[in-house]
Amino acid sequence: MATSDRLDTAALLPLLSRPGRYIGGEYNSAEIARTAGLNWTLAFPDLYEIGMSHQGLQILYHIINRTDSYAAERCYCPAPDAERLLRARRIGLTTLETGRPAAACDLFGITLPHELCYTNILSVFDLASIPFLARDRDQSHPLVIGGGTCGFNPEPVADLFDAILVGDGEEAVIDISKLIASMKGDGACRDEMIDALGSVSGIYLPRRYQPRYRADGTIESIAPQGTAPDRVARRVLANLDRLDHLLDPIVPNARIVHDRLAVEIARGCTRGCRFCQAGITYRPVRERTPEQIIELASRGITRSGFDELSLLSLSTGDYSCLPEVLPELMRRFAPQRVSVAMPSMRVGTLTREMMDEIGKVRKTGFTLAPEAGSERLRQTINKGISEKDLLLAAEQAFALGWNLIKLYFMIGLPTETGEDLEAIVQLVDKTRQAGQVGTRGRQRISVSVGTFVPKPHTPFQWEPQLSIDESRERLSFLKSRLRSKSITLRYHDPQQSWLEGIFSRGDRRLTPLIIEAWKQGARLDSWSDHFNLERWRNAAALLGLELDFYLRARRSDERLPWSHIDPLVSEEFLLSERDRSLNREYTPDCRYHACQQCGLCDFKTVMPVVHNRSRVEPEKPGSEHLSSDNGRSNPNFSSAAGASPDEHFRYLVTYSRTGSICYLGHLEFLQIIHRCLRRAGMKTHFSQGFNPSPKVSFSPALPVGTQSCCEFFVMDLVNPLEDLEQAGIDLSGALPAGIEVRSVAPMQEALPTDIVSRYEIDLPAELTENELARIEQFTNLGELVVARERKGKLKRVDLRPLIRDLAATGGKRLTMELISRSGHPGTKPAEVLAALFDYDEEMLLQTLVTKVSWSGLRD
């Protein structure tokens, strides 16, 4: 596709509430070659800040783009304001990398991260001009492939996809690319390509399976067609040895949910919690070696500039080499002021030295996940922890300095009774009391409660789910009992859990429901401020669907909607675990103990990969996970950071910001500069205190959307720069597109506090005669009063003393000079234009403002 084919959507950015979601150009994003033999679009069906926090999409993106023949670009689900604007302007969804139409590709891959994203898939399809149903697509449309967590019961959306990958995607994405590239070269048609995908391990072709239903609504059969296998086996990546695609993480420009470097230290968990789907669908445990983790962390921080590192796993505390890895990471990164986030730490497996390290964590919140309040119910779900362990963990966390303990519970677990709910109350109170033993300050308890959703491929997949009213009744009980000022109760909306359960356990008869609810306006259903249950109920009533049917208990011999998807864990094992739950029998972790005969491992290619088996776990319930979910190591905690040198070397860096990147906010620009300095290897001094930050001062904040040729920051370096020109080149190379360093110079004197800034303003329409007359008369204008609202009160402000000059330099261009005095309110060009010409918001948003120079104010 030629460059001229790029869809220019930059004109839309001023009209959006958070334009940073749509600008692209992130550091380490791929430069896409137009000569690629095969093109992917990787779509994430949620907002940018969620999708950019998802590791799976980034992994596939880098694997594809590291090949010579294939290319992948990204797109995310637009927010409602962006969707409305695209429709109003009749503009389709485009990719972030090149701005090409999202559907102008060979393969359109969609992540399936959770069940409440299904209407977002339709939004992406519709904006990309892709028919919803696979059967309605023709040769002009890309092949649509899904994959992710929901691939283990894809039936509610199966008719939307040409193919769905079940399991790990690292190797599969290359197999798919090779196959389709070869067939494309041979001139194969779309149907031939889809059928051929069935030969790729882990690929499920929905059109090859035909469900049949009984009169009572249950499934009679899911019949494979032609040569399709009875069951589609999950694809398993044997090990995590490959690292090359993880060394250059995309660094977001806009703020995202998990804005840090994530290093996956292990995949899979065999703790055996009977409610946990991930514990089945991601097993066996496959660990990375300590050397691999250190390499990923070191190179990832160097190439990204992140100031936080997070160790990712379903159960980080169970990583067998953690006692060696964690202190080494802290030793390496403390001098760089990079903090190490340590989620899911298991106190019972930590050495004394490890506990000392954890005591240095930034103490924002420590999470205990008992899941159930009573010992009996924890045994039922194979949680493997005792109340004694929980309270000891809480006491230790409080003693180490945490003032907030977070407790996570579920309601509606199998066999739950009123006594179990009462046990939640009692356990919360005992945890609160644990904070009063030998600690100072005010201890707080945050309790989070969610409704249990029986997930496919778990021992509890046959169990019923609570109705909305049942969930509300149990939550009301907890709210009435947990009333202490030191206890905060939060809970997941029972309505959202209800809908999640329906799609978790649903079948293809729900596809029309998703489409109808989308037509009625359902969007972003995992976001509480967008979720509307009535849309779903109205759609179900229109289609004659009884949705509670999907939440009922299932017979053990009943054909389940996901029965033809094989997680490689046998149904016999799941039934055995279900029976053991009723007897409250503990199932130990197979990574350290005997094989539990789940049916997954062949011990040739698929087997647990554990690097330190001497770290023996107990045969019976042990210690609970502790997670500093928002906590992280304090990078200023010890002498490891070294004493700061006495010498300070200050440099004034002038830079320009042009194009789409100007639609980021001031705090996002600050973050970009801080990360740029890390990537360029420039070591700054840091502020003192518990949360040290680089000593960098910035020019006054510009309004979002304003370009500038003369922004600056002052950096206080530990060492002098030997070559200022090269320093500018290095800094420019470490910045995202749209920001360029113009000069680096030693600071000779303090910067003026009162300044005059000169702007060039390009208007969307020609100046009228009346407006030109206003400009001519401006010099003699005595005042220009505007009303500003602050804290609910209106205040009259005269802008005239803040405007030194205003002139028309062309039919659509103005120049303006504004005065800014330290400690006094200022103004901005848009406010002046609105007051002088009575411009409305849309006119102002389409006006291009560029700051071209600044100087000290001389009265």
Image: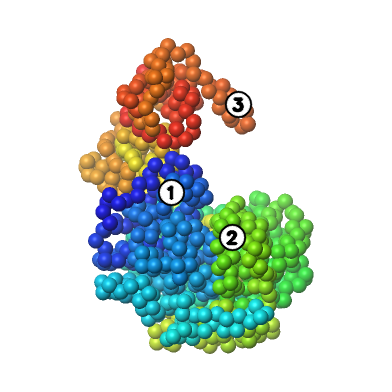
Q: Residue at x 28, y 35 (%)?
A: 746
How far from the left and from the top, in percent, is residue 544? Answer: 66, 68
Could you tell me which quadrant the C terminus lies in?
A: top left
Q: Is residue 65 visible?
A: no
Q: Which residue is mark 3?
A: 794
Around disc 2, counting alpha carbons within 10 Å, would you say few (fewer than 14), some (14 to 19), or many (20 or more)? many
| Distance of label 2 from label 3 (alpha carbons) | 43 Å
Of circles 1 and 2, the one toward us is 1
Quadrant where the N terminus is found in the figure: bottom left
Image x and y of residue 835, in percent: 49, 24
Residue, disc 1: 90
Numbered disc 2: secondary structure = helix
In this view, the residue in front, 656 or 142, is: 142
Residue 143 at least partly seen:
yes
As shown in the figure, which amino acid type bears the numbered disc 3? Leu
Q: How many marks?
A: 3
Residue 31: mark in rendering: none
| Image location (x, y in percent) of residue 251 | 38, 54
Q: Are marks 3 and 1 in contact (CB under 8 Å)?
A: no
For marks 1 and 2 on the same chain, the one whose residue lies earlier in the sequence: 1
* Residue at which label 2 appears: 517
Q: Secondary structure at mark 1?
A: loop
Q: Residue at x 42, y 19 (%)?
A: 770
Position of 567 with respect to 391 (left or right) is: left
Is 848 on the left or on the right of 36, as rendered?
Answer: right
Q: Amino acid at mark 2?
A: Ala
